[in-house]
């Protein structure tokens, strides 16, 4: 099991300094708009992932006008006390500690404290670009397999180098062919690992998401989810050779696993084009719930579940089913925010498990 027992935030977003104690597995967080409900969930996410779920840059998480921030959390993980600290120094240097020891590589922290967030804008996962779906996939797979995460880091680094090389051709007036060959080689190895991992993993995973969608949506209109990668069509080395001239012309890498996607289809059409709002939300929940279950079975304990404003998104009946499943059956720790105190309290009371209500 994984339980966050308390968290102290210092100069994190709207918080100056505050400590929260979590005494039950089910924690409701309520308060008016802008009081810091989402930020509190994000602080928890930060401890698990070494970064914010919402802001791309670390500095956006520092209280405006101040410098540096700190988040400290005390977990109980399978009976062991685990202290996780994240510090952003005044010069924006980030440090992560586990039990007072500095991490040399933040990547070794990923997957140790698994968590799943569901936030209002996540419907992007259905309607947004392929980048959002790759991020979903990478967040999950990075927590399952360290080599996957390392390959992703390597791949993105080489991809950047390759793109700068391609950009520099115009300025310099010539192409360093040998260097491009070396970068191709360096791209292929992690690229193939990521491709093979995604392909193998999604083969079973996606049909299960589709099945779960039918249950959540209460429909018999089947969705089809497909893994797409250019690497399904040809060998990566071969693709890089085929697209070499195009890449040089467009000054960027136009082929590779950074073009992968999860295609979502309903009745042979693009899901996002024909699905109703409710169907989109159902598919989003099916994807997130599967992510939760996958982490749970891989780790042997439930990830922390962070539910931001979910009452706004799903009707009461489905919400209750979801909570029943994660709070009661999985006995996982759940943080759930809402602006309406009564609505939240009522929903939690119905579960018949002890819960705590925090009012901001
Ligand atoms: N870096 C920052 N420094 C200071 N304040 C910040 C920072 N980032 C965000 N905030 C403030 O935090 C507040 C929003 O907090 P948050 O999103 O957690 O609210 P919320 O309780 O979830 O509200 P809602 O009910 O509208 O979702 C805003 O007032 C915003 O200005
Ligand atoms: Mg919010």
Image (cartoon, helix red, strand yellow):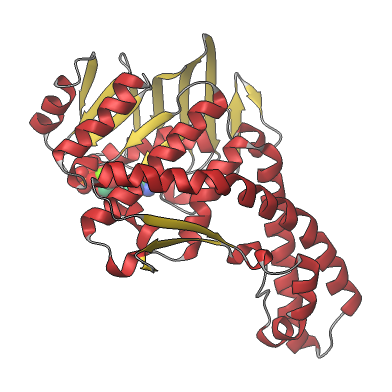
Which of the pair 65/47 is nearer the observer?
Answer: 47
Judged left or right of residue 246, residue 36 is left
Which of the pair 59/309 is nearer the observer?
Answer: 309
Where residue 334 appears, as percent x and y from the top left, is 33, 27
Where residue 123 appears, as percent x and y from the top left, is 33, 55
The reply to whether residue 343 is visible in this rendering is yes
Residue drawn at point x = 65 percent, y = 37 percent: 145
Q: Is residue 24 above or below residue 323?
A: above
Judged left or right of residue 301, residue 126 is left
Residue drawn at point x = 36 percent, y = 42 percent: 212
Where residue 347 appears, as percent x and y from the top left, is 15, 28
Q: Residue furthest front?
A: 220
Q: Residue furthest bottom?
A: 173
Which of the pair 76/291 is nearer the observer?
Answer: 291
Report the quarter where the C terminus lies: top left
Residue drawn at point x = 40 percent, y = 25 percent: 8
Q: Quadrant of ligand 2?
A: top left
The reply to whether residue 11 is visible in this rendering is no
Residue drawn at point x = 31 percent, y = 23 percent: 327
Q: Residue furthest top?
A: 79
Where residue 33 appears, as percent x and y from the top left, is 18, 44
């Amino acid at each position: 099991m994984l339980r966050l027992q308390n968290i102290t935030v210092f100069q994190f977003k709207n918080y100056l300094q505050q400590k929260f104690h979590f005494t039950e597995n089910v924690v409701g967080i309520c308060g008016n708009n802008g009081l810091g409900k989402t930020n509190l969930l994000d602080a928890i996410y930060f401890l698990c992932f070494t970064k914010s779920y919402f802001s791309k840059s670390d500095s956006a998480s520092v209280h405006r006008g101040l410098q540096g921030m700190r988040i400290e959390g005390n977990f109980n993980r399978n009976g062991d006390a685990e202290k996780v600290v994240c510090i952003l120094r005044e010069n924006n240097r980030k440090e992560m500690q586990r039990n007072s020891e500095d991490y040399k590589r933040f990547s070794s922290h990923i997957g140790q404290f698994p968590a799943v967030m569901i936030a209002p804008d996540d419907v992007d996962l259905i309607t947004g670009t392929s980048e959002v779906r790759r991020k979903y996939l990478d967040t999950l797979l990075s927590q399952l397999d360290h080599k996957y995460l390392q390959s992703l880091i390597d791949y993105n680094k080489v991809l950047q180098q390759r793109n700068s090389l391609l950009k520099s051709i115009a300025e310099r007036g010539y192409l360093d062919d040998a260097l491009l060959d070396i970068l191709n080689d360096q791209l292929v190895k992690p690229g193939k690992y990521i491709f093979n991992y995604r392909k193998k993993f999604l083969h079973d995973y996606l049909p299960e998401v589709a099945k779960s969608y039918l249950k959540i949506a209460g429909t018999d209109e089947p969705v089809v989810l497909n893994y797409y990668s250019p690497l399904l069509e040809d060998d990566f080395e071969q693709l890089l050779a085929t697209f070499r001239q195009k890449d040089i012309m467009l000054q960027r890498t136009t082929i590779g696993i950074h073009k992968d996607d999860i295609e979502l289809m309903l009745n042979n059409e693009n899901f996002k084009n024909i699905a109703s709002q409710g169907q989109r939300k159902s598919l989003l929940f099916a994807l997130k719930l599967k992510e939760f279950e996958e982490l749970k079975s891989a780790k042997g304990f439930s990830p922390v579940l962070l539910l931001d404003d979910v009452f706004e998104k799903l009707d009461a009946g489905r919400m209750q089913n979801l909570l029943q499943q994660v709070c009661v059956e999985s006995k996982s720790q759940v943080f759930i925010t809402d602006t309406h105190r009564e609505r939240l309290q009522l929903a939690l009371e119905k579960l018949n498990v002890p819960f705590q209500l925090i009012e901001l």
